[in-house]
Image: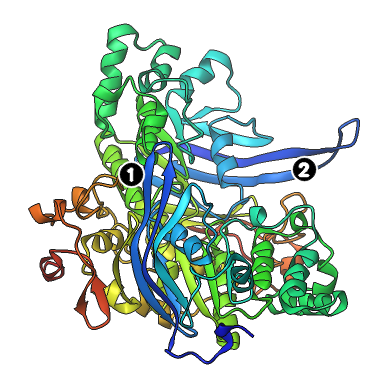
């Protein structure tokens, strides 16, 4: 696809989400956890954007702030050119129909006291789309779509396995015909053989319904499989963003390089010959990120400049964005 | 000292023979481990792979005799450590084996460390108990161990509590504790599952280096086929409490014979696959281990299954030299690969 053909469905500009740290009897505000710190990217209609990073890097918070489950501290989110941060009430509810989310833990994200009919049918009721027999019909249709038996709609979540529960969550998210689904680690709680089933289902539905996904995960090989473009996050910032093949074939940021080299490959012959970049130390706390580039405490190629100045997130090659002093665009 | 000190009569450090473990619960009998047999050589590395509920952890806990009894029961089998059956020894003797001869590290380092005791105290405890060290010696040794696993300023960090350590550091501390008495065998039960990939790479690298240095054998239990590929020499694949395929790691990955192993490897995304290629997926779900049906446990999900598979459990038989498979249709499976 060329740029002209690609329609931007979601534009995120300078998004920030800080969580206040409070201490003492009077709950004095003593600092901020910068969970998401100045993140900008576009999502094109019909694509899958992978969002990867290690725990605590802010990928989940980014997803939740986009959909306004969290109020952003700063920045704009445009969905089909509507600024989501500025709208309220019924307007926001209207927009929410077009954006849905599925969650990591299929055990915690479904109410144990509601039947499948109640869970999947709830959005239809809340948004007054369908009721009664019509609702039941639509739920049956949705269950069929995600590969569940509609005859089981009177059952409760505990009667289903993890993979089936994830399908129930997916059916619920599809109830209102959304355009965009934010998938927050949808497969990491599932077994390997079940993961493949759910990923295949997500891909089939994308083709059938023309969905756009933001796929948040820490499993880099699965992200590579499902995504068109991939953004790598570290400590609240996107450090690199580009096409899937470009990112995995030609990673520019030292963190992306280390991250990719740390992923075990299920092939003993490849593993034997691999040279790993082993990063020293742990992730710094997002409450006290390092000065300058926030990767400088672990970066194997950090130089003086990296401790003084924050690198800008720039387009270094066509469609390849990176935030690193070592990586500069060719002039 | 004890029998395990003697030079091994065989070259196998550990021989597990026909191990059967069941749990007697209110819902019925859980057939958790159903006749698992394998050998592990001195200093060898064995990967045990399988999905949740396949019995890989219960099998390891059975080897350590850490199964809660009741409801659990080791029904039969032998676990020979340098020729001595540790399922037969007294509980007090077993306590000398655990920690000193076989050490185990677990998935979640937060729940396996005691939060109200300092890290140093917990490492020193084993040293004082098993090696008869006094406080001063134990403290010095504990600091040495923490340094060895790569924790900076170890002698000061001994006085920290577990919550002051990061996840990776806690797992390092657990490894230090496991290695404190120079065990012959380290059983690692999903030790990196709760950690990030860059930290996982650090821990794997650490265990490999320590193994080279100390010469211990390692059993690495995981669901991650990638981790095993880079770490183990031998692989056991488990499904529904049974060992269904075992052999050298390159054989298993390069030439799998069991339909489950084939499916499991196929369900992983291939790095060189072009965009849009679907993953291979195994239909259905693993069986409930309560009242396991007769026949091959994989038969209901297997595309190769024939009538016989539904009634008769296949035996673990040699397919290639050193490569054992439990499948009636193994020739047909390997031919179609």
Looking at the image, which residue sits at the far right? Answer: A25
Q: Where in the figure is residue B46, as x and y percent of width and height?
A: 43, 75
> From what the image shows, is residue B184 above or below residue A45?
below
> From the viewer's perspective, is residue B162 above or below residue B319?
above
Residue A71 or residue A25, whichever sits in front? A25
The percent coordinates of residue A144 (x first, y second) are 24, 29
Q: Secondary structure at mark 2?
A: strand
Residue B288's disc number: 1
Seen in the image, is A154 located left or right of residue A258? left
Task: Please report the residue visible at 39 percent of the width from the left and 16 percent of the height from the top.
Answer: A124
Q: Position of residue A19 (x, y in %)?
A: 72, 38
Q: State which chain disc 2 sits on.
A: A
Is residue A65 or residue B226 the one in the foreground? B226
Is residue A331 at least partly visible in the picture?
Answer: no
Q: Is residue B35 left or right of residue B164?
A: left
Q: Which mark is residue A96?
A: none
Q: Nearer the viewer, residue A44 or B242?
A: B242
Mark 1 in CB contact with mark 2 (< 8 angstroms): no
Is any atom of residue B258 visible in this view? Answer: yes
**How many discs mark residues in the rendered view?**
2
Residue at horizontal 69 percent and vertical 58 percent from the top: B113
Q: Which residue is mark 2?
A: A32
Q: Position of residue A184 (x, y in %)?
A: 48, 42
State the separation of the CA atoms marked 1 and 2.
47 Å
Label 1: how many Cα within 10 Å (few below 14, some 14–19, many 20+): some
Identify the image's colour scheme: rainbow, by chain, secondary structure or one colour: rainbow
Q: Are marks 1 and 2 on the same chain?
A: no
């Amino acid at each position: 696809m060329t740029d002209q053909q690609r329609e931007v469905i979601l534009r995120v500009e300078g998004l920030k989400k800080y969580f206040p740290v409070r201490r003492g009897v009077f709950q004095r505000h003593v600092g901020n956890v910068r969970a998401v710190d100045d993140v900008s990217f576009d999502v094109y209609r019909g694509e899958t954007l992978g969002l990867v990073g290690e725990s605590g890097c802010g990928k989940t918070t980014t997803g939740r702030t986009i959909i306004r489950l969290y109020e952003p501290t700063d920045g704009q989110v445009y969905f089909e050119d509507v600024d989501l941060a500025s709208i309220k009430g019924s307007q926001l509810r209207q927009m929410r129909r077009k954006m849905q989310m599925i969650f990591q833990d299929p055990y915690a994200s479904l109410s144990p006291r509601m039947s499948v009919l109640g869970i999947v049918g709830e959005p239809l009721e809340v948004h007054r789309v369908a009721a009664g027999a019509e609702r039941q019909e639509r739920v049956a249709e949705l269950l069929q779509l995600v590969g569940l038996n509609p005859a089981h709609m009177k059952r409760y979540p505990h009667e289903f396995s993890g993979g089936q529960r994830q399908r129930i969550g997916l059916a619920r998210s599809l109830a209102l015909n959304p355009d965009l689904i934010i998938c927050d680690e949808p497969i990491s709680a599932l077994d390997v053989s079940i993961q493949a089933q759910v990923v295949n289902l997500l891909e089939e539905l994308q083709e059938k319904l023309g969905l756009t996904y933001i796929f948040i995960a820490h499993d880099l090989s699965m992200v590579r499989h499902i995504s068109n473009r991939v953004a790598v996050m570290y400590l609240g910032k996107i450090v690199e963003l580009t096409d899937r093949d470009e990112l995995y074939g030609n990673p520019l940021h030292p963190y992306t390089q280390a991250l990719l080299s740390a992923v075990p490959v299920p092939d003993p012959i490849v593993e034997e010959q691999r040279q790993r970049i082993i990063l020293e130390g742990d992730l710094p706390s997002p409450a006290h990120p390092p000065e300058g580039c926030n990767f400088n405490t672990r970066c194997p190629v950090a130089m003086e400049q990296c401790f003084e100045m924050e690198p800008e997130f720039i387009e270094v090659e066509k469609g390849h964005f990176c935030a690193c002093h070592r990586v500069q665009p060719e002039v | 000292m004890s029998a395990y000190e003697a030079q091994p009569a065989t070259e196998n450090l550990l021989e597990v023979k026909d191990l059967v473990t069941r749990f007697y619960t209110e819902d019925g009998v859980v057939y958790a481990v159903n006749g698992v047999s394998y050998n592990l050589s001195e200093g060898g590395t064995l990967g045990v792979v399988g999905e949740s509920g396949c019995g890989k952890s219960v099998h390891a806990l059975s080897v350590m005799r850490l199964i809660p009894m009741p409801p659990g029961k080791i029904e039969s089998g032998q676990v020979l450590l340098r020729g001595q059956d540790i399922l037969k020894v007294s509980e007090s003797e077993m306590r000398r084996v655990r920690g000193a001869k076989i050490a185990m590290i677990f998935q979640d380092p937060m729940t396996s460390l005691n939060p109200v005791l300092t890290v140093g105290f917990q490492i020193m405890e084993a040293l004082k108990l098993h090696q008869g060290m006094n406080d001063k010696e134990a403290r010095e040794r504990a600091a040495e161990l923490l340094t060895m696993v790569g924790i900076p300023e170890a002698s000061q960090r001994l006085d920290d509590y577990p919550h002051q350590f990061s996840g990776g550091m806690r797992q390092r501390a657990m490894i230090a504790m496991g290695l404190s008495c120079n065990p012959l065998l380290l059983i690692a039960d999903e030790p990196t599952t709760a950690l990030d990939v860059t930290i996982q790479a650090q821990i794997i690298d650490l265990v490999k280096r320590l193994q080279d240095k100390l010469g211990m054998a390692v059993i690495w239990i995981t669901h991650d086929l990638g981790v095993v590929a880079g770490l183990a020499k031998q692989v056991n694949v488990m499904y529904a409490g049974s060992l269904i395929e075992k052999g050298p790691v390159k054989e298993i990955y390069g030439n799998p014979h069991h339909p489950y192993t084939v499916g499991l490897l196929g369900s992983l995304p291939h790095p060189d696959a072009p965009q849009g290629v679907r993953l291979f997926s195994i239909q259905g779900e693993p069986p409930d281990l309560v009242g396991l049906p007769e026949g091959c446990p994989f038969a209901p999900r297997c595309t190769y299954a024939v009538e016989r598979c539904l009634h008769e459990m296949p035996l673990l038989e040699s397919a290639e030299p050193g490569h054992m498979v439990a499948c009636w249709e193994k020739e047909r499976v390997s031919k179609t690969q």
